[in-house]
Image (spheres, rainbow, N blue to C red):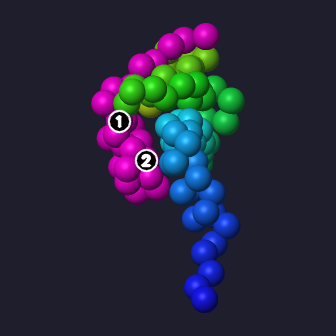
Amino acid sequence: MAFISLGELLNRKIKKIGLNKYQDKETVLKIVNSFLKEELKFFSEAKAKDYKNGILSISCQKSVISSQIRMSEEQLRQYLKKHLPTCVLKRIKYSIE
């Protein structure tokens, strides 16, 4: 008798009932926020707010920070692809708070 991990069972159930898009959204936001904190050292100045239909929304406190993230956009895409290969990122929107 083969055992299946609890994580695998949960993933199957989530996909079956159609909640995987919400799980993917939260996963993308978590990965992008960790990139902003770890790689770019923006602890509270920038935060990923939303991910829907391949469009990522990042909120920044200052326009300078959004410019720095724009310059590191390719690095962000590679980081996201490395941690979540199934993610499709079409565009990144920036907003200033």
Q: Quadrant of the N terminus?
A: bottom right
Is residue 84 shown in magenta?
Answer: yes
Residue 92, position as x, y percentages in the image: 39, 25
- Pick whichever, 44 or 80, lies toward us: 80
Q: Earlier in the sequence, mark 1 or mark 2?
A: 2
Q: Which residue is mark 2?
A: 80
Is 76 on the left or on the right of 25, as rendered?
Answer: left
Position of 15 relative to 66 (above/below): below
Q: Which residues are magenta?
A: 71-97
Does residue 64 show up magenta in the picture?
Answer: no
Between 69 and 17, which is closer to the camera in this rendering? 17
Gap between marks 1 and 2 measured at Cα: 9 Å
Q: Nearer the viewer, residue 71 or 97?
A: 97
Element type at marker 2? helix
Residue located at (58% from left, 65% from top): 8
Residue 41 figure quarter: top right
The residue under the point 46% across, 55% down is: 83
Query: Horizontal and vertical percent for residue 26?
Result: 59, 38
Residue carrying label 1: 89
Q: Residues within 10 Å of mark 2 (few under 14, many from 20)?
A: many
| Amino acid tagged 1 | Leu
Q: Secondary structure at mark 1?
A: loop
Label 1 with label 2: CB-CB less than 8 Å? yes
